Image: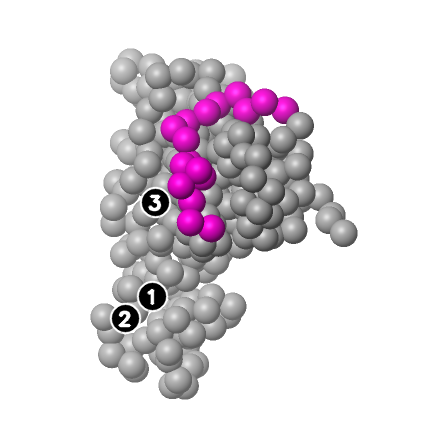
Amino acid sequence: MNLSSRVVLKAFLEHSSPAEQSSLAGYLAPIEKQILDKLPKTYGNPLSDSETPQQLLGQIHPSWISPFLRTLSEKDIGIFLAAIGTPLSSAVGKDLLYAGKIPHLSELGKEYLQKTLLGYLTAEIEDLLPLSSLPESPLNALLDLKIDLLNLSLDFLGLHDLCVEIKQIIEKTKLQKINEALSTHQLNYLKILLQSPEPVAFAKMGLANWNEDPEKLKMLIRQRGANRMAKALYGQDPSLIWYVLHKLDFERAFLVKTLMSPMDNSRAVQILIAQILEYITYIGRPHG
């Protein structure tokens, strides 16, 4: 029995009467009962919450889909674009420079092609849990973020590293160049971070040697944000990690995955998780 089946079985037993639970549990081997007992509480209700293939594809960044379609003929590309539907098909089609017509497909045909595409995307993970079956975790909040806001998170989390070093810069011209490289929202967030000491410090960014190239600074901040995201995600459920990585564009996801490694200090991990939740709270507020 795989993990997905066990999660559903446990939910079914928990929603049964005590007499039914006792009767049904009698059919389980003792080791299976122990495994079920140790399963954590789920993110949703595995018995009632479900996502269609199209809903799942809607949670995946287009950059993950384009490489698969790029190997197909123009006719087949059009068929798959028809299957995934807008707005995803528009983004993927633009990436592929597809100028052909989008054919009409039956609902059955769409579902088949959607499942084919999901099969390709999930080939790397043995047993992808449905969203509702994920174990409870504060980082499940990342799943509620829109794709663009999740991708933006790395550019905000990296400001924690910038915050540590910017306090040591006294050159007004360099400070001005840093400010010019940041968006208005990033500047506002940085001002908030500067009000408190940074509790988790990694190796220095090396701003003293920065050549004042704004694009280089933006990439450096993004890399630092990816590192914080990666360290916070390490040890989380593999399915949650899969969902988060596939909401990020391929390049950002590759960066996060590369940097994913354990930290010796468990307290530091909890702080990184809290910083991610702080970003989610901040980005959800109205900003004038």
Q: Quadrant of the N terminus?
A: top left
Residue at 45% in and 39% down: 207
Is 232 within the magenta? Answer: no
Q: Are marks 1 and 2 in contact (CB under 8 Å)?
A: yes
Nearest the camera: 70 or 112? Answer: 70
Magenta segment range? 196-212
Which residue is label 2 attached to? 70
Dot 3 alpha-carbon crowd within 10 angstroms: few under 14, some 14 to 19, many 20 or more: some
Closest to the camera, between mark 1 and mark 3, is 3
Nearest the camera: 79 or 32? Answer: 79
Q: Main secondary structure of the magenta part?
A: loop
Which residue is label 3 attached to? 255
Residue at 47% in and 50% down: 212
Q: Earlier in the sequence, mark 2 or mark 3?
A: 2
Q: Earlier in the sequence, mark 1 or mark 3?
A: 1
Q: What amino acid is labelled 2 in the image?
A: Arg
Q: What amino acid is labelled 1 in the image?
A: Ser
Residue 177 visible in rendering: yes
Is 197 within the magenta? Answer: yes
Residue at 39% in and 84% down: 99
Q: Which mark is residue 66?
A: 1
Place of residue 47 in the rendered image (x, y in percent of width and height, measured from the top left):
49, 38
